[in-house]
Amino acid sequence: MRLALIGAAIMASLVAGYVAYVTMIGNPRVVTDLKEHPMGERAERAMLLTFPDGKTIPVNYLREDNRVYAGADGTWWRAFDGEGAAVTLLIQGEALTGHATVELQDQEFIDDVFSRLRPTVPEWLPDWANGKLVIVDLKVSAD
């Protein structure tokens, strides 16, 4: 029993440490890199997504015409469940606006997009571990 509690405490500490690293060290570095090197290697794979409340996170993306797909790991995709929400994107130095929703129902469509968005994900990985698909329909400016 004592060993199980020690093991659980160690696991909880590792998870908390990882979350702290990502939110306080990892993500700020990625955000800075995407802003300072908009045509860099990282910017080919990651964009900045800004929520309606102003929170900004880096996330992998796939842009196809006037639609951007993002893979949501974690729970941030819930901000776009239901009716979705307006967002701002920074993709390779270009500021874009759009409306984000999450696709939870059409597994065939989700699998198709993820095959291009994350082509190196192992096939044995279960769908629930592959993140949620966030779809951003870009606002097209009338130039």
Image (tube, helix red, strand yellow):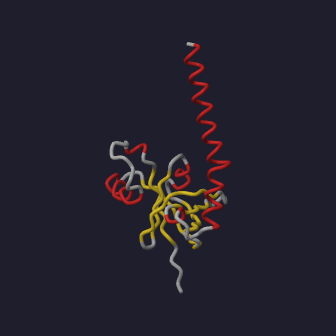
Answer with left or right where residue 123 lies relative to residue 103: left
Q: Position of residue 60 (x, y in %)?
A: 50, 58
Q: Residue furthest bottom?
A: 143
Q: Residue furthest left?
A: 108
Q: Position of residue 8 (x, y in %)?
A: 57, 24
Which residue is painted at 64% across and 48% down in the image? 23
Number of marks in picture? 0
Observer-nearest of 18 and 51: 18
Observer-nearest of 33 and 66: 33
Residue 92 to residue 110: above or below = below
Which residue is painted at 60% across and 27% down in the image? 10
Answer with left or right where residue 95 lies relative to residue 129: right
Query: Dividing the picture into quarters, in which one does residue 47 lie?
Result: bottom right
Q: Position of residue 36 (x, y in %)?
A: 64, 67
Which residue is painted at 38% across and 45% down in the image? 127
Which residue is painted at 42% across and 69% down in the image? 64
Answer with left or right where residue 37 lies relative to residue 124: right
Quadrant including the N terminus = top right
Query: Dividing the picture into quarters, in which one does residue 125 lie?
Result: top left
Residue 89 to residue 120: above or below = below
Q: Residue furthest front?
A: 41
